[in-house]
Image: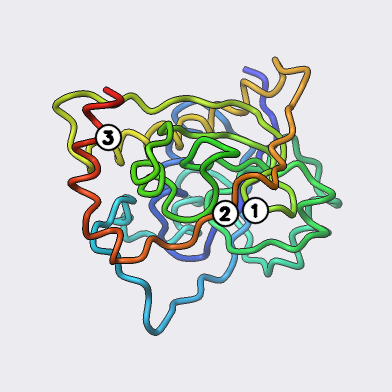
Amino acid sequence: MNQPDIVVISYNTPHRKTQDVLFQLKVKGYQNVTVLALPFVFRENPFKPIYAHRPSTAVDVSPEILCERFLYRFKTVNADEIHPYLNENPNDFVLITGAGLLPDELVENHKLINSHPGWLPKVRGLDSLKWAIHKKQTLGVTCHYVDSEADAGFLIEQREVPVYANDTFHSVAYRQYEIEIDMLVNSIEVIPSRTEFTSLSTTEFEATRRMPKSIEENLMQEFEVYKEEFC
């Protein structure tokens, strides 16, 4: 198979999404993979939602050891070191599996690929699944090139997340997560077939913050109503 040079931007600690993406890359036969690992900042008082909806349990193996076992390259970096690294090292695809805010210089000069758990541009920001249910928006995943605007950039691919009558909130959340991983890895095959990448920039829809618990406490009832309308 054609072997593109793939860079994965992630954290320097065991991270579920990164592990799942690296596993898929390995299964699909990609060999030229480099992980650029950013320092992960642990918060003293992390936000604790009422309903966790993102798979968080990672295999307790450091990303450096995982890359060693997968025969992938690994490098610990700070955010401001990624731009010069990409300039100096040829690459075909740069996937984001975990990162905080990245420098404008980086996102404006390199085609960084993200997979967002929401239907852009309508559902932007944090807790997208929860807000989509609350606002009765389409549940989806958007794969896109990022830019300096939050959850914007240029569209690569979008997929709706199906909802079935026997679903629970958490079964839908996990289905969305699986689609998110698949689309991020699959972008390596999708991008060469695209000739246009539509802008996702918008002033119509604001990016959301964490869902307040005063709204979240009613989420399970809202999900049952959502199912009646959308499944």
Relative to 116, say whether 24 is above or below: above
**Residue 73 visible (yes or no):** no
Q: Earlier in the sequence, mark 1 or mark 2?
A: 1
Across and down, in percent, residue 84 comes to: 83, 59
**Does dot 1 land on a helix, a strand or a loop?**
loop
Rate crowding at label 2 as few (under 14), some (14 to 19) or many (20 or more) other CA atoms within 10 Å: some
Quarter of the picture holding the C terminus: top left
Q: Is residue 113 visible?
A: yes
Horizontal and vertical percent for residue 60?
Answer: 32, 61
Task: Determine which residue is flagged by label 1.
Answer: 150
Which residue is disc 2 drawn over? 207
Residue 13 vertical placement versus 219 (above, below): below
Viewer-proximal residue among 152 and 176: 152
- Amino acid type assigned to the residue bearing label 3 in the image: Tyr
Q: Are marks 1 and 2 in contact (CB under 8 Å)?
A: yes
Spatial separation of the CA atoms under disc 3 and disc 1? 27 Å
